[in-house]
Image (cartoon, helix red, strand yellow):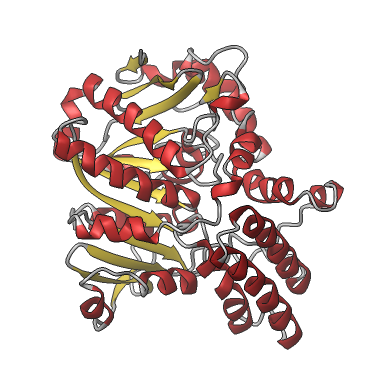
Amino acid sequence: MVQLTTYLILGLLPLLALVSAGRRPSPGKEAWGYVDVREGAHMFWWLYYADGPASYQDLPLVLWLQGGPGGSSTGFGNFEEIGPLDRELQPRKTSWVQTASVLFVDNPVGTGFSYVDGPDGFSRDVATVASDMLVLLRSFFTQRSELQNVPFYIFSESYGGKMAAAISVELSKAVTEGAVKCNFAGVALGDSWISPVDSVLTWGPYLYSTSLLDDYGLLEVTEAAEAVRKAVEEQSFQKATELWSVAESVVDQNTNGVNFYNILTKEPDEELSSLAKGDFIALLARRHIRPLHRQSLVQLMNGEIRDKLGLIPHNVTWGGQAEEVFSSMAGDFMRPVVALVDQLLAAGVNVSVYNGQLDLIVDTMGQERWVNSLAWEGLPTYKGLRWTPLDDPAAPGTTGAFYKRYRNFSFYWILRAGHMIPSDQGAMALQMLKMVTQQS
């Protein structure tokens, strides 16, 4: 039996607990709760109704999926990227809530405030992730029937894009069959881990072209990437994951510790050296989960936010199962899901890809590589189009992005942004949201 527990707060009540601490409250209407998606697997969600000049019923609903896997949408996506308040609980000028209702889900189970009762509850592949999300969405739209006819979009980041592709395929089928009542309007894949090997194979050329590798470094990174390619071609995906970790270390050594999330910054990680040699999965988890769980965010989520929500089990800590979530998915990391994107396009689903210029872990060169391999019948015409520049809303007269669109596929190149585009270029990300959801 699937159970849905919901707290719905109106007006200025959501942050009354924070007002007493001198914080500015969030306006608007919110709801949050848990869905038991499987026995022993409990998924947490948090909804902000659109809080702009138009009624939420006249605006789209956006589901935001974080990466990792193990990164929390209700934490990082909410307070670091697109929610109404930032990490300091101050209003965010570029919040997506001003132009859409936003649903954050801690996915897969075990992420953020979601939790499992035992190790068997963790997801091990995107098929299980998609199945769990379908259970949640079915319950969500049944309970929030006022949102069933609102255009519903899935936006994602990083590994969240890989999950979004799988979820979108299953959701499209479920809507057609009447199993889920919603107006599914499209999916947006941001800096997404759709074809991992294409990302790894382009690290060397990208870093070399930006003067972050010399000839010797390019050779070493290329050799490490080729080892990953070979393992993927042999479908030895666990081995490919380990070799991916090796390739990252080769990049790190040759670039003096370039930040995989934004090549113009450097974030040394002294903790990595303490890991046992050969512990590839733990190294990856630490490298890619830690940036999503900064200490200040951990304190906020396990302090004031936990108190506000009022329904988090006493034995659940925000982010407490994140590394287990990451490790449980290790065998699925390097599997491509390009075929799922082809399925979506063939089914007529609107698909958007967007990528940050300064991202390394999922560099734009790698994204373009898998896009150009699509079997989609519209690809030849799309490739023949020239891109269109977009003005940066935060700096009028400056180019903030380029985009190209043909039929139900579009690509956005976001300039001066790394992996977390809304954090780096909030105004441009908001403009992209409006374009994808056909508001401009």
Q: Considering only vertical position in the picture, is 221 above or below 134?
A: below
Residue 359 visible in the snapshot: no
Q: Considering only vertical position in the picture, is 64 above or below 352?
A: above
Q: Is residue 365 left or right of residue 212?
A: left
Residue at figure coordinates x 60%, y 11% from the top left: 314
Q: Quadrant of residue 205?
A: bottom right
Residue at figure coordinates x 42%, y 51% from the top left: 161
Q: Quadrant of residue 233?
A: bottom right
Q: Position of residue 282 (x, y in %)?
A: 73, 45
Q: Looking at the image, which is closer to me, 8 or 28?
A: 8
Q: Considering only vertical position in the picture, is 436 above or below 79?
A: below
Q: Position of residue 2 (x, y in %)?
A: 35, 16
Residue 11 visible in the snapshot: yes
Q: Is residue 149 left or right of residue 287?
A: left
Q: Residue furthest toward the bottom?
A: 215
Residue at figure coordinates x 57%, y 64% from the top left: 234
